[in-house]
Amino acid sequence: MVQELFSLTDQRAAVIGGTGVLGGAMAEALARAGARVAILGRSAERGHLRVQSITQNGGTAMFVAADALDRNSLLEARHKIEREWGVVTVLVNAAGGNRPEATLPPGADFCQLPLPAWKDVFDLNLIGGVLLPCQVFGEAMLAARHGSIINIASLSGITPLSRVVAYSAAKAAVINLTQFLAREWAPMGVRVNAISPGFFPAEQNRALLYQPDGSYTERGRRIIEHTPMGRFGEPHELAGVVVWLASPRAASFVTGQNIVVDGGFTATTI
């Protein structure tokens, strides 16, 4: 049956960045499909709110404090989950973001982009966003010869968007590392894929897309005009793809892929 194909009742998921809007939506989707979900992040307040939301809807979840840029912190989180539930079988790497200092406003000089800001964005999206979590949780998955890793990239990793130069380059590296790990770890039973969301309003980018009165900014309007579906994405619209990639039955032969969820933005030329 289709329900059995996408059921995650025997899975244990860790969602790093599950305290955020998109990571939280994916965590809730995994829980609705039956997985036990550990929310990993630095904000205990937001983490417990997400756990409460999941448990109120009949799911099983817990919050585990963790810093994605600290290997020891991730190891402690992994061991806590293993003591409670066993080895993590699904890892969602949803931590990431941009920094204002690493963007290029119209007319800005790329040659003057500060290196510390560039490094900060790469650390956030590549080192903490993928590398360290994959090393820490992937180690246990490889030993168990079973697991699904889902990295959150971006459509800007496919086509570099204006202004967010460091973020685009970092997300391109995320896609490349995803493919590398997929190739290396497939013989050991671990699948590695990426999801590249399009424009989904969240805390970090809302001011770039909307005016204080709720109307579109110039940038927001141009994005909408370039998107065939004529709107921004909503967090719940990532649910289907994350459950599919997490399922050892529905996606058993899927690895090394970058699934774009962007309302058709990357299929459109100007």
Image (cartoon, rainbow, N blue to C red):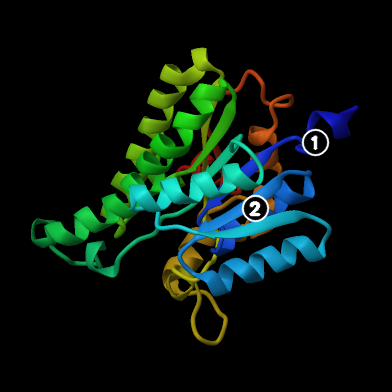
Question: Residue 77 location in percent, x, y?
Answer: 49, 51
Q: Quadrant of residue 180?
A: top left
Q: Categorize mark 2 by other alpha carbons within 10 Å: few (<14), some (14-19), many (20+).
A: many
- Residue plotted at (45% across, 65% down): 42
Residue furthest to the left: 111
- Residue plotted at (42% across, 42% down): 133
Label 1: which residue?
7
Say whether disc 2 or disc 1 marks the residue closer to the N-terminus: 1
Cα distance between the residues tagged 2 and 1: 14 Å
Q: Secondary structure at mark 2?
A: helix
Residue 237 lies left or right of residue 205; in this view the side is right
Q: Residue 221 versus residue 55: which sits nearer the camera?
A: 55
Residue 78 lies left or right of residue 29; in this view the side is left
- Residue plotted at (42% across, 71% down): 208
Label 2: which residue?
27
Q: Secondary structure at mark 1?
A: loop
Question: Residue 237 location in percent, x, y?
Answer: 68, 52
Numbered mark located on residue 130 in the image: none
**Residue 263 seen in the figure:** yes
Q: Quadrant of the N terminus?
A: top right
Q: Categorize mark 1 by other alpha carbons within 10 Å: few (<14), some (14-19), many (20+).
A: many
* Residue type indicated by callout 1: Ser
Q: Is residue 211 above or below residue 41?
A: below
Q: Residue 235 versus residue 75: which sits nearer the camera?
A: 75
Question: Residue 127 location in percent, x, y?
Answer: 32, 46
Residue furthest to the bottom: 213
Q: Is residue 121 above or below residue 131?
A: below
* Residue type indicated by callout 2: Ala
